[in-house]
Structures are given as C-alpha cells and as structure tokens.
Image (cartoon, helix red, strand yellow):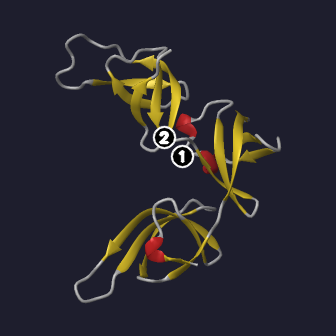
Amino acid sequence: MAVVQALRKGNMFEEDAQLWRVLDHQHIKVARGGATIRLKLRNVRTGSTVEKTYNNNTRMQDVRLESDEVEYLYFDGDLYHFMNTETFDQVALTPTVVEDVLPYMVDNQTVTLESYEGEALNVTLPTTVDLNVKWAEAAIAGDTANVPNKQIELETGYKMQAPMFVKEGDIIRVDTRTGTYVTRVQQ
C-alpha cells in the first residue's frame, strides 16, 4: 500500500479494479484544514483522463510493473508488433498503448514494454533518441533577429522546431520527454 502524497507523475496505482497513471500531482494546504492531494489521472485501460482529490494519508494499492526490453518490428495497419529481445516472443499492441512514443519510434528500435499481470500497458523510450532530418525549411541569411529556429520534419513524420543550421540529412538528438531539439549528432 502506498500513501497518496508519495505518488508522483508517472506512478501507477489500482483503485476500484481500474489501473490509473498519475499525470499531474498537486499538494493543497489550507490554513487550518488538513492537506489534500489533487491528482490528474489517466485510466490505463480506457485512456480517459480525470481529476480526483484525496485526503492526506489516504492509502492506495500500488502496482508493480514488469519491464521487458522489446524491439519494434513493424506496423501492419492495425497493430504495432514488437519482439522480446530475450525470449523472442512477439507481442502486438494497439495504437493507444504506443501513441505517446510514436513521434520518436523507428523500425528495429529497442524500447521498454511495461506490463501488469500479462497485460501490456505502456511503451517507454530512452530519454533521448537520434533521428534523421527528412525535411528542413530553408534558412535565410540574416533571419536570426526574430526567430532563430525553423520547422523541420523527422524520419518518423514528427514536425518540430530546430536551430537554423540544421539541414536535411542531419541526424539530431531529440528529448522524448518534451519533444525538443537537444543537439546535432556528429556523423
């Protein structure tokens, strides 16, 4: 059992036979009253998002997830297929399970698959990934006064802002938590 004030962003718990992932955590203290904890939660199975308020010291059933390293194989139009790198078992996941990592996921990439009692719940990527720039806006000389960034498109189809010197064919490092440019990778 976990105490509600110990929950942080990304933690999971079980309540009313549903699995919930914490999206946001807010501690509210009123002058003479007791503290309350307001959580923004996502139902892992249905994808719905709700806000719930709990009294301080409320106990929750915490969840221990199993983690396996899997390799992304392909998308068949309906499901995303992965292979466990140790057992070579294949698992097919729905788009709702992988929607958060799709902008950064390429074929043959190793990711972490989190599951609970045999049910695949989440795919996580490393903090940064290196991706190829498929298209980049033309950089105009002297156009650094107002906007020192330009629009680029990565090999995955994800569009983002990057510095003016980034060009097509470059490999850049992207932060998967925020979706922002980190650095250009030397080739």
Label 1 residue SS = loop
Q: Amino acid at mark 1?
A: Asp
In this rendered view, identify the residue nearer to me: 122 or 183. Answer: 183
Q: Quote the CA–CA distance across marks 2 and 1.
A: 9 Å
Q: Is residue 179 left or right of residue 114?
A: left
Residue at image point 83% right, 44% down: 87
Residue 120 point in image, percent of width and height: 70, 55
**Relative to 86, does residue 54 appear above or below in the rendering?**
below
**Relative to 26, does residue 102 appear above or below in the rendering?**
above
In this rendered view, identify the residue nearer to me: 112 or 158. Answer: 112
Residue 176 tag number: 2
Quarter-of-image position of residue 182 = top left
**How many other residues sit within 10 Å of disc 2, few (<14), some (14-19) or many (≥20)?**
some
- Foreground mark, 2 or 1? 2
**How many other residues sit within 10 Å of disc 1, few (<14), some (14-19) or many (≥20)?**
some
Residue at image point 24% right, 89% down: 32
Q: Amino acid at mark 2?
A: Thr
**Relative to 159, does residue 78 appear above or below in the rendering?**
below
Residue furthest to the bottom in view is: 32
Residue corresponding to mark 1: 100
Question: Can residue 136 be seen in this snapshot?
Answer: yes
Q: Is residue 186 left or right of residue 108?
A: left
In this rendered view, identify the residue nearer to me: 49 or 69. Answer: 69
Label 2 residue SS = loop
Residue furthest to the top in view is: 141
